[in-house]
Image (cartoon, rainbow, N blue to C red):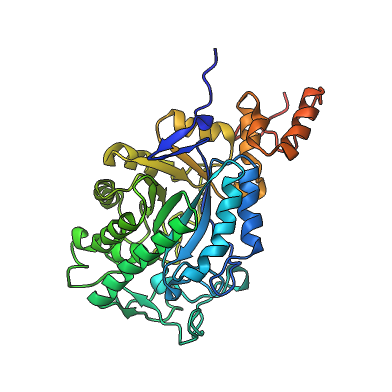
Amino acid sequence: MPQAPLLFEPLALRGLTLRNRIVLSPMLTYAAERGHVTDWHLMHLGKFAAGGTGLVFMESTKVDPRGCTTPRDPGLWKDEFIPGLERITRFVKGHGAAIGLQLGHSGRKARNSVPWEGRAPLASHPGLDDGAEWELVAPSAIAASPAAAVPRALSIPEIQDMVACWGAAASRAHRAGFDVLEVHGAHGYLLHQFLSPAANRREDRYGGSPENRMRFAVEVVEEVRRHWPAEKPLFFRVSAIDEDGGSIEETVALCRVLRAKGVDVIDCSSGGMTPRSIVDPADRPGYGYQVPHAARVRAEAGIASMAVGLIVHADQAEAILQQGSADLVAIGREMLHNPNWSLDAAQKLGVGNAFAAIPPAYGYWLEKRDSAGFGGRPSTWQAGIEPARAP
């Protein structure tokens, strides 16, 4: 008997069981209005739940209005945001998926225009909460790029206030009905800035040695875990390596500490510390180019990992799990291309009753077509990474 696909095996994390190992990676859509989610977010996230995804992640949602990457980021720095988010969690869970929220703060990378308007640093902008001038803050007064403004270095009391902001946002996320929380510590944003020897030049207990540079991230995780129920899983996203001195060895050391502090899964990305890509521009990144980072974190830090980054095809995702490189597979832009990626993967991997994971308003008709001897393949069909070649 052929082995059942691991991609479609349920996974238990604390008190939560995911229906499969497929995750919608958190992706910024820049569609919020003064921090509030809109109907866009309900549509955007709901279609992935209806498409059979196991865990659907809400994009990076900010714990502090100063931490928004753009004026269109969603927020969770006050209770007024909870009802809109609760509407989304109720819908997603009603269609069989779990729903997660990524909590973030952009630090010195805040206050930009949206990508399709150039992603340019805004010289000034009214704050998203009280209308006061939008201030950039960071571990040190070092700009993110030559075009960006120089941020103000946070004082130690302000760092401690920021830690409290993460805890309060975690509490709100629980009240809004989220099943999973992820702390965003990657891509050159505030936590990553503290971790980086290039962005963090402090000479107090939050700078200098690797242990001091990871202190802020550890305190944030401790505070989030204190406000996040023990039965709910906690993820942490890392840039496992970056283009400005961040090493896999320091990442593994951080992940060992985070595991002891109550983190359950490490979401393994890379880069983001400078405008230069982690991938050499002379080369195109290969399929699954970040999977080796997830494998190494999993093996050396003794913690579950999630692989992300150009994971496109069903058999590719299955191989990542079968080889023990990761426990979960996150799909990003490929899921934008095909919101029914999970259904497509189930058919390609030979999962019985593949239509059972989608709403009957879709599943009934698709199963009817399939059982009637359609005699062809859906338009997305491709068995592997390499396109089929004529004999």
Q: Exactly how many numbered labels are in the figure?
A: 0
Q: Is residue 114 above or below residue 40?
A: below
* In-front residue for pair 38/297: 38
In the image, what residue occupies the spot 66% across and 62% down?
A: 39
In the image, what residue occupies the spot 32% across and 40% down?
A: 303
Does residue 263 appear to the left or right of 274 in the view shown? left
Q: Position of residue 226 (x, y in %)?
A: 30, 56
Q: Quadrant of residue 342?
A: top right
Q: Visible in this render: residue 322?
A: yes
Q: Position of residue 224 (x, y in %)?
A: 34, 58
Q: Quadrant of residue 32?
A: bottom right
Q: Visible in this render: residue 333?
A: no
Q: Quadrant of residue 172?
A: bottom left
In the image, what residue occupies the spot 30% across and 73% down?
A: 161
Q: Is residue 190 above or below residue 48?
A: below
In the image, what residue occupies the spot 41% across and 53% down?
A: 182
Quadrant in which the C terminus is drawn: top right
Task: Residue at the far top: name it.
Answer: 1
Q: Is residue 174 above or below residue 126?
A: above
Q: Position of residue 241 (x, y in %)?
A: 35, 53
Quadrant in which the N terminus is drawn: top right
Q: Position of residue 385 (x, y in %)?
A: 59, 35
